[in-house]
Amino acid sequence: MPAPNCQTVKEHVIIVGAGLVGTLWAALLGRRGYRVDVYEKRPDMRRVGFVGGRSINLALSDRGWKALRLAGLEEKIRSMALPMEGRMMHDETGRLSFHPYGLEGQAIYSVSRGGLNLELLHKAAAYDQVQFHFEHKCLEVDPESGTLQFEDLRTGKVVSAQADLIFGADGAYSAVRQALQKRPRFNFSQQYLEHGYKELTIPPGPNGEHLLDNIALHIWPRHSFMLIALPNLDGSFTCTLFLPFEGENAFEHLNTEAEVRAFFKQWFPDAVPLLPDLTRDFFTNPTSTLVTIRCKPWTAAGRVLLIGDAAHAIVPFYGQGMNAGFEDCSLLDECIDTCAGNWPEIFRRFNASRIEDADAIADLALRNFIEMRDRVADPRFLLRKEIERWLHKQHPRDFIPVYSMVTFSHLPYRLALQESREQDRLFEHILQIEGVEKDFQNEKVLAVFRQWLATRTESPYEKYRSLQEGAP
């Protein structure tokens, strides 16, 4: 596929990593006429397929859809995705309660990681000037010369490549980032949760039907651990068990089939009949870790930039890891126009503004883990969510629930984190109103809300406009 409106001369780009972010960015650059070479250490999934059991199912929201729209893939991916309008809570007796994510018509979308990656790969490869090199492991990166060394895993030979621009999209354990870590004044941290995760599967019913409501993300919250399930198009659900590695209820105690069955029967009794392959899945699929990566700067020598998990891996509890990586791509795509293709300036601006947002969504994701695991069964927490929805309907510009800011808007993550602190202050007062649990749609609540508004200088949207006006 020839690129539209491409100039005669474009920079040569190398992308390391052909996962979700790498293939999306290759497609967006190919669309603009850049010559792109993508190197990936795994085999070509078009040839070998996608291997499951290693990744948490994906939830697409507004930030991700925007990037897919830019790539011309929104319609195709919507045909592969299932809307989830809220959380379906399962208590220990099997009783269900549904809690919407946002207003009517708002949903996040369950999508197959492998299916999405494959469509992005096809889209990028359709551009004549985008080439993929699979089974090539990145060994070295020299930012000053733009030279990289790769090992061809099929032959064992080391090959060199050179480009004007290098993008590290090679995930949480990025080889490109490791090269930048050798440079002076590069800051890096990684934080592992004490929890790990394991994938399980609820198969379709006898007629291919879903055995649980397929318009919800199902959660079995158990305070220090939880099980979740996301629907798939084929009638199955991808389940993920989040559990501490050590402790009273932990992976360290689940070493036999009998121990696994007893654990699930005790804590997830209504899920057990839906998991006929429970023990096989449990002992076949790996127990994986959950890590948060923070680093800066993301750029080096005006020609290397980290994006996606290579720059800002986060835990999956806000459903924003992929969406944040996709937003990296849409923001960079906008910067190409804003900066007239001046790549050192594009890198400078992106590095100056995006790191704060990445740190903010990392913090929000860690907080949401506690919410999903511990608080979704707390009556006062659920009351707060109901009041949030009511206030948002009454004052849509002045009050936006933090979850909606993150999931159903393009407001910077840093504003959502700031707003979460402001709203905590508001609800400290609202939840102290006598009788609020019986009736919150009243003048007492609105009076507290108006007092809170009076202490604020700007709404989130006004803050966003101020940020844009103050941008370099």
Image: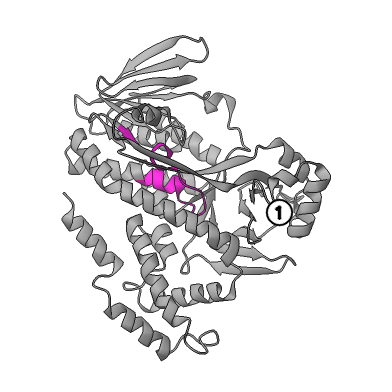
Q: Residue at x 69, y 49 (%)?
A: 250
Q: Amino acid at mark 1?
A: Glu
Judge whether residue 54 is colored magenta.
no
Which residue is nearer to you in this view: 405 or 429? 429
- Answer yes or no: is residue 406 visible: yes
Compared to residue 323, the image places residue 12 above or below, namely above
Compared to residue 119, the image places residue 239 above or below, namely below
Q: Residue at x 71, y 54 (%)?
A: 248
Which residue is nearer to you in this view: 161 or 433? 433
Q: Residue at x 53, y 13 (%)?
A: 154
Judge whether residue 319 is colored magenta.
yes
Whole-percent x and y of residue 468? 21, 56
Question: Looking at the rendering, which quadrant does residue 411 occupy?
Answer: bottom left
Q: How is the image coloured?
A: one colour
Which residue is nearer to you in this view: 449 or 455? 455
Residue tagged by mark 1?
248
Q: Quadrant of the N terminus?
A: top left
Residue 209 located left or right of residue 462: right
The magenta stretch spans which residues? 305-327
Whole-percent x and y of residue 208? 71, 49
